[in-house]
Amino acid sequence: MKEKGKLSGVKEIARRANVSIATVDRVIHNRNGVSPKTKKKIEAIIKELNYQPNILASRLASGKVFRIAVLIPKGSEMTDFWDAPLKGIERAEAEIKQYGVSVETFLFDLNDKATFLQAVDALRAKSYDGFLIAPSFVEEAKEFARYCQEQSLPFVFIDSNIENQPSLSYIGPPLFQSGYLGSRLCAFGMGTSNKVLLVNITRESGNYNYSQIEEGFKSYFVENKVPFDLIKLNIEETDYESVALALKKAFLQHPDIEAIFVTNSRVFSVARFLETMDKAHIQLVGYDFVKQNQDYLKKGIIDFLICHKPEEQGYKGMMNLYHHLSLKLPVDKVYYMPIDIVTKENQEYYR
Amino acid sequence: MKEKGKLSGVKEIARRANVSIATVDRVIHNRNGVSPKTKKKIEAIIKELNYQPNILASRLASGKVFRIAVLIPKGSEMTDFWDAPLKGIERAEAEIKQYGVSVETFLFDLNDKATFLQAVDALRAKSYDGFLIAPSFVEEAKEFARYCQEQSLPFVFIDSNIENQPSLSYIGPPLFQSGYLGSRLCAFGMGTSNKVLLVNITRESGNYNYSQIEEGFKSYFVENKVPFDLIKLNIEETDYESVALALKKAFLQHPDIEAIFVTNSRVFSVARFLETMDKAHIQLVGYDFVKQNQDYLKKGIIDFLICHKPEEQGYKGMMNLYHHLSLKLPVDKVYYMPIDIVTKENQEYYR
DNA sequence: CTGAAAGCGCTTACAG
DNA sequence: CTGAAAGCGCTTACAG
């Protein structure tokens, strides 16, 4: 690791520049208190030597710990979706805490904006060095983004994006394209009537994410000149009874529906309805590898799940912050997750 | 990071045990030259304090660099499959070289066993601390595994496995299950004749990997009581002309083939044949997200590609070695890759 | 079998 | 604006 009697690193730079290593250190970290002249000289030498600081030594000497705060929804009884990103975050934490990173996690309730705001206050109160956030409440997240920008603190969005924000990076699904794939998967099950039901089970069906998916969904049929008859159903209440009622009505009107596409993880409610009504043959496509969906996939009632590696999103988000803060590496501003197709046959090995 | 006046780490252990830190260090690393009595005492204290050595300090002080050697096939003009694991290996290298790991890569020619043996000699000659190997030549790889075991050197197999070897871990696809999925994907395209053609384009069609895939493939139809008529075709010569000739014959005998399953990445040759013969409507399923296959996927001639994240395999294999060597972390003995389904619609985001 | 001392390549007060 | 010195938590000869 060492050449003969030669110095290396800051010592060698100091020797060449005829200064002390303290001054070299100042230049490396862009601290002031160095005359422009020596600064120039040192910078030239750094460049010439293509000097790369030894991170091991740097972290050891500084004792600095980067504090990262995480703000994501808590897993509900309805769905364990958010357990996955959390797992990825914890995996990243285990890997990097050795190198001086500490992580604190705040969970909010997706049905209660106040819990989000409360957590945001906590994030501001303590002095964190970076944030990993699921910006579920758009306006509130924007407000926090402004705060981060003012304070020059990096933040990463995961799972859903808000356009044009000063985030370090966004990690999540390419929604339009996943909707597009959704159509293709529905098309497998279509025969004569060509009737497709698109179901939004959420209070937020108007928001950007859902409309992206819908656009993609329609686009496939149009582009590929597949004749189709799209029926759209927005269900605001997410409990099973409301979903069942709405579906019953839809089937009364359109008994010849051949495929159903559900734009989020609540596809299991539709699956339960189809099972109850003996309509398991209808092609059913939805999102997310959550526990309940896995069961219906196994039973063959859900035909395809579209997934976006939620665990990986959490892991990758953390690592991006770590790379940025600790290693000063550049990170991708946008990182789209792949669009995974999970079926009964490959679900056993999906992660 | 520090408590008041308290010592921590080896110093604190030394203080409590009434020995020098050198002795503590000896015990931590299980070096001999410590009386059983002091050893016991120190071990007790380590346990009591739940002491975790500071890796940063350890690596910095020792200056030790772990040397890992990689032995994988080189990408050929035919297929760039092996470029992906290499990319993953390089990504891992970039991440961990900061922490004292050096990587040397040896590439062999899949069509020339001698190049494999030659590389193996090189691996033995230099003193490496661990190996990442694609055991394409089974007997030769076994022989090298024996050598590693003798020398107590860890090695990781990727992409294909050899049963019952003393490897640190194996990272690769669950082959049986991927063949099983292959049937399901073929079944989408089958209608009346139920004739499926299974094509092996390799000289090694008899080996364990291919037979696993085949077993899985058949198993789906049997288990799900799908009526099917399986025609099997082994093509030994991998050039396009040989493939085309063999396929032509098969179609002469069975003009009503509805689906074709190719058990490796050479599905592009079959795609080319189908395109030429105006048989693009036949359901075509194969393996691996290599350049040529992507093109036929885009054209809609290949319907599905089954993939096993080759880049991830390389990355994960390196990280397993690193975790084992440097961090002394336990690693999974077998790590199955997920079985990814790639279609025209999601290929853009596949990695 | 054991310990004192130097050193890994940085950073951090502190003094000037 | 600059430098000498101590220190981060380990490891490594070397001496006994």
Image: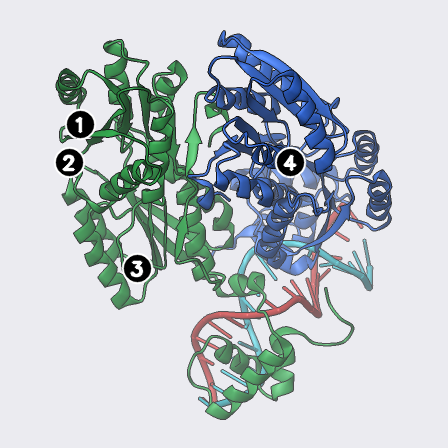
Chain colours: A blue, B green, C cyan, D red
Residue type highlighted by circle 3: Ser
Vertical position of residue A37 compared to residue B256: above or below: below
Q: Residue A9's x, y, as percent?
A: 56, 51
**Where is residue B234, by image quadrant?**
top left
Q: Please tell me whether mark 3 sits on a helix, a strand or a loop.
A: loop
Which residue corresponds to mark 2?
Answer: B203
Q: Nearer the viewer, mark 4 or mark 1?
A: 4
Q: Note whether residue B223 is visible.
A: yes
Res B5 label: none
Which quadrant of the rendered structure holds the N terminus of chain B?
A: bottom right
Q: Nearer the viewer, mark 4 or mark 2?
A: 4
Q: Please tell me whether mark 2 sits on a helix, a strand or a loop.
A: loop
Chain assignment, label 3: B
Q: Tell if the residue under mark 4 belongs to the same chain as the one under mark 2.
A: no
Label 1 crowd bin: few (<14), some (14–19), many (20+), radius 10 Å:
some
Give the mark nearer the N terminus: 2 vs 3: 3
- For image coordinates 38% across by 25% down, the residue present is B188
Q: Tell if the residue under mark 2 belongs to the same chain as the one under mark 3.
A: yes
Nearest the viewer among A292 and B66 is A292
Q: Disc 2, disc 1: CB below 8 Å?
A: yes
Q: Nearer the viewer, mark 2 or mark 3?
A: 2
Residue type highlighted by circle 4: Ser
Residue type highlighted by circle 2: Arg
Q: Residue B138's x, y, as percent?
A: 20, 50
Res A269 label: 4
Q: Disc 4, disc 1: CB below 8 Å?
A: no
- For image coordinates 64% across by 42% down, the residue present is A81
- Residue B335 is left or right of residue B57, and the answer is left
- For image coordinates 70% across by 47% down, the residue present is A77
Which residue corresponds to mark 1?
Answer: B238
